[in-house]
Amino acid sequence: MKSLLVVLCCLTFITLHAQENYEIQVYGSSTMTKGQTMFELHSNYTLNGNMDLINGVLPSNHSIHETVEITHGITDNFELGFYLFTNYTPNHGWRIIGSHFRPRIAAPEKWNLPVGLGLSAEIGWQNQEYAPETFGMELRPIIDKTIGKFYFCFNPVLGFAFQGIDINNTPAFAPNIKSSYSVNARFSAGLEYYGDLGPLNQFEKLPQQNHAIFAVADLYLDPKWEVNFGPGFGLTNATDHLVFKLIVGRKISWLKKHV
């Protein structure tokens, strides 16, 4: 287990920016249960976004991003995920624009750590008409904690693209934060923050940075289903001003239960 954590840490040198509007999600530390598969659909609609062609990348305004995510639990603390990204942009139609592969590991409960710890690494490609970084990876450390009915999670994401427009050899810092309150066993409400400050050695000026706040709800109406949704508001000129996201997940267990 510790050796796997070391391997994923080494991937710091080949990381990729966050998935922008294709996967708007703060990762918790726990992994998928061994022998269980989660099928998720990420549906994100940009109601008010960029309207200009920038460095060959199509405008995001009124775009629909549909991402299929399939995650399977390999062991009690290790999972593998796969993403297929699709996009609808007015006047350009629906397109499959890329795919990613993601291993993720969590610290075992027997370590008795005061917080949940995890590490995710993601590799893949995207069409250059839809993303300035076309090939690379991301490294996502995960730290979370539940205190009573409150849940806190921090993903200090490091991103480095090695193919695309304006390549920078220094990892970029794209922090994600979530705070939520469990109203009851089936419903929680909270805030999610998504940022992209630019290269670690020289952050972008504030207007060029990406900062967004989402007001979200999480539904657990059935043990097999998970739902996360809410509107997001951009805080800088470089950020899409209004995005609505919806994540629907369905768990399937393949291992037979022994009585």
Image (tube, rainbow, N blue to C red):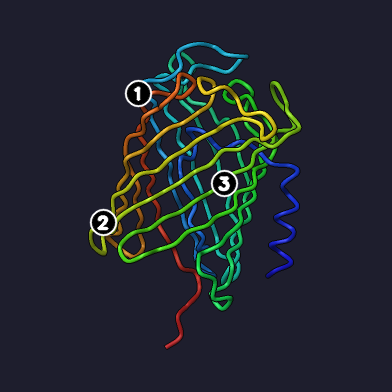
Residue 60: percent from left, percent from top: 46, 21
Query: 152 and 52: which one is in front?
Result: 152
Q: Examine the image and state in which quarter residue 146 appears.
A: bottom left
Under mark 2, the amino acid is Phe
Name the residue tied to disc 2.
Answer: 187
- The residue singled out by tag 1 in the image is 47
| First of labels 3, 1 by sequence position | 1
Judging depth in this view, the residue of 143 and 252 nearest the camera is: 143
Mark 2 or 3 closer to N-term? 3
Which residue is rendered at x = 60% and y = 34% of the image?
98
Q: Residue at x 57, y 24 (%)?
A: 130
Q: Amino acid at mark 1?
A: Leu
Query: For the residue marked with disc 3, what is the amino acid?
Result: Pro
Q: CA distance from mark 2 to mark 3?
A: 26 Å
Residue at coordinates 40% horizontally, 53% vertically from top-left? 249
Residue 18 in the image: x percent, y percent?
A: 57, 38
In-image side of 165 versus 41 (left or right): right
Q: Is residue 240 above or below residue 174?
A: above
Label 2 sits on a secondary structure element that is strand
In the rendered image, which quarter contains the C terminus?
bottom left
What distance separates the C-alpha of mark 3 from that of mark 1? 27 Å
Closer to the chain start, of discs 1 and 2, is 1
Labels 3 and 1 touching (C-beta < 8 A) = no
Q: Which tag is nearer the camera, tag 2 or tag 3?
A: 3
| Foreground pick, 98 / 197 | 197
Q: Which mark is residue 156?
A: 3
Query: Is there CB contact under 8 Å for labels 1 and 2?
Result: no
Q: Nearer the viewer, mark 3 or mark 1?
A: 3
Q: Residues within 10 Å of mark 3 (few under 14, many from 20)?
A: some
Hey, which residue is sitting farthest left in the picture?
184
Bin the neighbour count of mark 1 within 10 Å (Cα to Cα): few under 14, some 14-19, many 20 and up. some
